[in-house]
Amino acid sequence: MYDHIKNQDPELFEAMKKEGERQMEGVELIPSENYVSEAVLEACGSILTNKYSEGYPGKRYYGGQENIDVIENLAIERAKELFGAEHANVQPYSGSPANTAIYFALLEFGDTVMGLKLDHGGHITHGLPIAFSGKAYNFIQYGVNEETGYLDMDEVYEMAKEQRPKMIVAGFTAYPRDIDWKRFKEIADEVGAISMADISHTAGLIAGGVLESPVPYFDVVMTTTHKTLRGPRGAIIMCKEKFAKDIDRAVFPGLQGGPHEHAIAGKAIAFKEALQPEFKEYALQIKKNAHHLAEELKKRGFKLVSDGTDTHLILADLTNKDISGKLAQNALDAVGITLNKNTIPNDPRSPFDPSGIRMGTPAVTTRGMREGEMEKIAEWMDRAIQNSEDQNNLNSIKEEVEAMCHQFPVPGIKI
Ligand code: DSN
């Protein structure tokens, strides 16, 4: 693999090779990661990276666009078909620029916006005070119910009535439960707010028909393309026709310059893959695997925020396990199980060493792992966390993890 890189830049090649081995030989549980197909990989590494194409299909500022327009139009039409959207912009470089473009399009600086608190499962672009979103707009933050871990829709309603926000942001990065989009939209309508959904985490489950979609209700819906949706790194923004011009102008020239057409080609391919019947099976299996992994962890005494999951994502509170999120992440790294330390709602600890760990099943599902493998993973996680300082024990778990992983190939990795 990568023969040209190997010859030209052995130092960099070595790190890439090792990363391939890590991806192949480990269990990937980071809920926002996945393995793209070889076709998507080819698009991302293709000659399309050579081309500048500022503007939109049919209205570009550079010559030589006859093929690029075909590619970008395929991505747009497939995104619209996949999600049933009225309008799609496929140019955002990633989730944070997409969210920033939406705010730039539809808000004035200083406007009041509602978003979920970061430690309750929100995102830095949903109003973190030190981030651009939190500095440029007056974000006010709702939370989940402390007892249940579920979104408190009554709190959302009361806050919206009191604060009259210009926009309500729903859709989260560490929330394991399904979202009542209809109720969000009713609340937004009642207070005259624009409804914005960030479905970056669950887009693949929505496209696969195993979770409700906000697209029929919401004014604007965005998603990254590289999580459950299993495309290249990037994002898209979908909206009702009446917001289309403002969104397009905010993405280009408002915020971005030349679109990354190699990534847009990868998005078009991923959307075509997501329109196939097999994608529905994949989406359903992600949910089954997450549910099974959650149950297996609970059997082993793990306390889960909201006591389980409706999605691909699980958030465990390790307080009763007597280990911090950081030390658990380190112990699991040592056995080849990758996930991330994460705050839990109202976490008394710092985000650098929080009380929880966040995990999910998209990547393992793509490799073909099923309920039986989830049971093994839960067992290894439990053993690694209990023996986090016992290197011999960790080494023997790592061998078992590697042996299982060798039975489940990863697209594009040959070692
Ligand atoms: N960093 C992503 C995640 O892991 O959820 C969100 O942007």
Image (tube, helix red, strand yellow):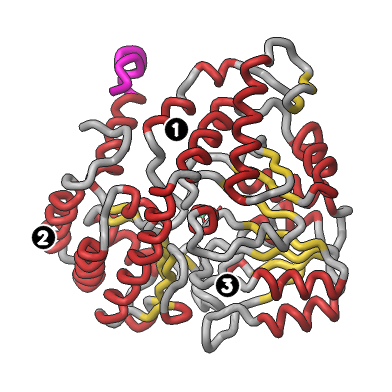
Which numbered disc flags the more N-terminal residue, 2 or 1?
1
Q: Which mark is residue 392?
A: 2
Q: Which region shows up in magenta?
A: 1-11
Amino acid, disc 2 = Asn
How dense is the environment of label 1, judged by Cα within 10 Å: few (below 14), some, or many (20 and up)? many
Quick check: 404 above or below 360? above
Task: Look at the numbered disc 3 and give the secondary structure of its residue.
Answer: helix
Q: Is residue 188 left or right of residue 115?
A: right
Amino acid, disc 1 = Val
Task: Decide which of 323, 404 is in the foreground and name it.
Answer: 404
Quick check: 152 above or below 272? below
Q: Which mark is residue 177?
A: none
Task: Look at the numbered disc 1 and give the secondary structure of its residue.
Answer: helix
The image quadrant that residue 284 belongs to is bottom left
Task: Look at the numbered disc 2 and give the secondary structure of its residue.
Answer: helix
Q: Position of residue 159 (x, y in %)?
A: 78, 79
The alpha-carbon separation of the residues under discs 3 and 2 comes to: 36 Å
Q: Position of residue 287 (x, y in %)?
A: 40, 64
Residue at mark 1? 40
The residue drawn where x is 80% and y is 47% is 241
The residue drawn where x is 84% and y is 80% is 161
Residue at mark 3? 120
State whether the magenta stretch is mostly helix, strand or loop: helix
Task: Decide which of 179, 25 is in the foreground and name it.
Answer: 179
The alpha-carbon separation of the residues under discs 3 and 1 comes to: 33 Å
Q: Position of residue 236 (x, y in %)?
A: 64, 43
Q: Position of residue 337 (x, y in %)?
A: 28, 56
Q: Is residue 191 left or right of residue 34?
A: right
Point out the frontmost of discs 2 and 1: 1
